[in-house]
Image: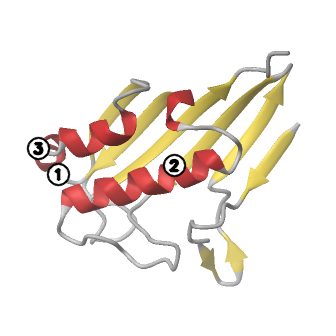
Amino acid sequence: MRANVFPDGLSKRIVGGRTLYSPVVSVDLGGYKLVFVSGLLARNADGDIVGAGDMAAQIHQVGTNLKIALSSVGATLDDLVRTATYTTRIDEFFRHVDARHEYLGTSLPTSTTVEVTRLSHPDFMVEIEAMAVLAPPTA
C-alpha cells in the first residue's frame, strides 16, 4: 500500500495550479514501511527561502524539514538508511559538518554528497533527499 503525504510544516510546491510532487511517499511491504523523502530545500512552512548565502542556516532548515517529513509517517532520524545531498559549494558544505551531524549523526545512514552547478533557485545551497525504513511493531 502506497501513501503520498503532504506534511503540515512543509511548503507545498504548486506551479500553474498543480502540485509538483509528494514530499513523502510511504510504502508498506509486509509490515515494514519504506519511507521516501523528496529533495528538501531550505524553505520554511510559508515557502520562503531561509539562510540565503549561509550554508549552516540552510543545513539547519533542511534538517528541520527532514524531521517534519519523517514524523508525518511516524519515522524519526534514527530510521534513516540513506541520504543523498546536493550542494552548490561542497567545500563550504564540509565546513559545517557539525550542523549536518546534528541531524544525521546518530543514525549514520549511507550517504552520497555531490556538488552541482545549481539547485532549483540560485539562493539554495543544499538539498537533501532521504530514505527510511520502519520495522513492524513488536507485540
Q: What is the residue that sits farthest to the top in this orientation? A: 139
Query: What is the C-alpha distance between the residues marked 3 and 1?
Result: 10 Å
Q: Which mark is in front, 2 or 3?
A: 2
Left or right, 43 with respect to 123, comes to right
Mark 2 and mark 1 lie on one chain; the one further toward the N terminus is 2
Q: In the rendered image, which residue does mark 2 sit on?
A: 67
x%, y% of residue 75? 63, 38
| CA neighbours of label 1 inside 10 A, class few (<14), some (14 to 19), many (20+) | some
Q: How is the image coloured?
A: secondary structure
| CA neighbours of label 2 inside 10 A, class few (<14), some (14 to 19), many (20+) | some
Query: What is the C-alpha distance between the residues marked 2 and 1?
Result: 24 Å
x%, y% of residue 19? 69, 71
Identify the residue at horizontal 58%, vertical 67% (top origin): 9
Mark 3 and mark 1 lie on one chain; the one further toward the N terminus is 1
Left or right, 60 with respect to 55, comes to right
Identify the residue at horizontal 84%, vertical 22% (top origin): 31
Identify the residue at horizontal 11%, vertical 44% (top origin): 95
Q: Which mark is in front, 2 or 1?
A: 2
**Residue 57, placed above or below residue 77:** below
Residue 101, by quadrant, is top left
Q: What is the residue that sits farthest to the bottom in this orientation? A: 16
Left or right, 9 with respect to 3, comes to left
Q: In the rendered image, which residue does mark 1 sit on?
A: 89
Identify the residue at horizontal 33%, vertical 72% (top origin): 50
Q: What amino acid does circle 2 point to?
A: Lys
Identify which residue, 86 or 25, lies in the foreground.
25
- Circle 2 sits in a helix, a strand or a loop, which is it? helix
